[in-house]
Amino acid sequence: MIHKYVKERLSWILFFIFLQLLIIIVAYLDAAIPMKPILYIVFLSLILFFFFLIIRYHKETKFYHCLEKWDNDLDISVLATADSPFETIVEDKLNEQTEVLKRDMAKNRLTMEQEKDDLLAWIHEVKTPLTAMSLMIDRMADSNIKAPLTYEWLRIHLLLDQQLHQKRIPFMENDLYIEATNLQGLIFKEIKTIQSWCIQKGIGFEVNLEISEVLTDAKWLSFIIRQLLTNAVKYSDSSDIVIRSDVEKGHVKLQVQDSGRGIEAKDLSRIFEKGFTSTTKHQDSAATGMGLYLAKKAAEALSIHMAVESKPGLGTSFTLTFPNRNEFVKITGM
């Protein structure tokens, strides 16, 4: 701040120094003016001016120090009171802009809440005919027609579910309930949901759970596993998906491994980005680029570390590392 203050007041400082030099030059040129008293006056003036700068520095930069440290949280009350007319102008303008931003933010938040509520209501309304469609498909006798209809119904169901959780993720901290969750029951439930799709593609499951219970939010963990399983089924054909759990260094690890087409090395660092699909099969219109992004966001909120390993043509492995009991303080705040 000292450097900035000197730079701001440099023209005044140079003008004062110029005046002192001018007095000395005049006294030097005019023999009638004694030099020693002039030098003494200039010396005193420089000392007084130096102390004057120090006093003014602390007084003039107090407001700007607060402004520099301001957290941009729209709370103007933390700023120091303006002491000069220019600072008052800045403070008034900041107050005006802050009030405008607060009004706009409140209006936008209300609009977003309304849009979210409308979309959630629409999703719940759509689920009713989807349930009816599922019942009608189950009663169909012709398997040649039933299988593709079941697959398309499942796609719609999963997309709606993804959209539903996408709207809930920004507020999921208010929806967390940490409890002992049975992994086996949860995984088998998700497998059953996509069973018809797996049968159609000739995909089986090998489940080997050394640890069958974890502390987490069951609903959001179901969503994460659902995204990993659907992703594995989508990019696999006629092969088994291996699901296993174990303990490593006090942390439970859950691994979902497929033998599908795999992920290119250049894409691995981007698969959790919003909207990213693939650079190798970019024309794949079935991919939305949202599943892994949402799974990653949900995992972060649960303090679950998600890692991925993949080799093109050899498959992909996703590993969820759960926090231990002590680390749940971060999630629950208790």
Image (tube, helix red, strand yellow):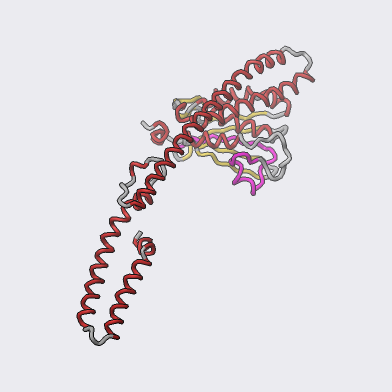
Placement of the N terminus among the 4 image quadrants: bottom left
Which residue is at the front of the view, 318 or 93? Answer: 93
Q: How many marks?
A: 0
Residue 54 falls in image quadrant: bottom left
Which residue is farthest top?
139
Inspect the magenta stretch and tell me whether residue 255 lies in it: yes
x then y, percent, for residue 183: 52, 27
- Magenta segment includes 312: no
* Depth check, front residue: 313 or 70: 70
Residue furthest bottom in the image = 31
Above or below residue 279? Residue 15 is: below
Judge by depth and name the residue closer to the eye, 27 or 319. 27
Q: Residue at x 30, y 59 (%)?
A: 57
**In this rendering, would 198 be left or right of 306?**
right
Above or below for 44 versus 318: below
Examine the rendering and report whether any part of residue 276 can be seen.
yes
Q: Residue at x 61, y 18 (%)?
A: 125
- Identified at 28% across, 59% down, the residue is 56
Left or right: 174 as drawn, with respect to 25: right
Q: Position of residue 41 (x, y in %)?
A: 22, 75
User: Whole-percent x and y of residue 285?
Assistant: 72, 35
Q: Is residue 184 visible?
A: no
Quarter in which the C terminus is drawn: top left
Residue 161 locus on image (x, y percent): 60, 26
Magenta residue span: 251-276
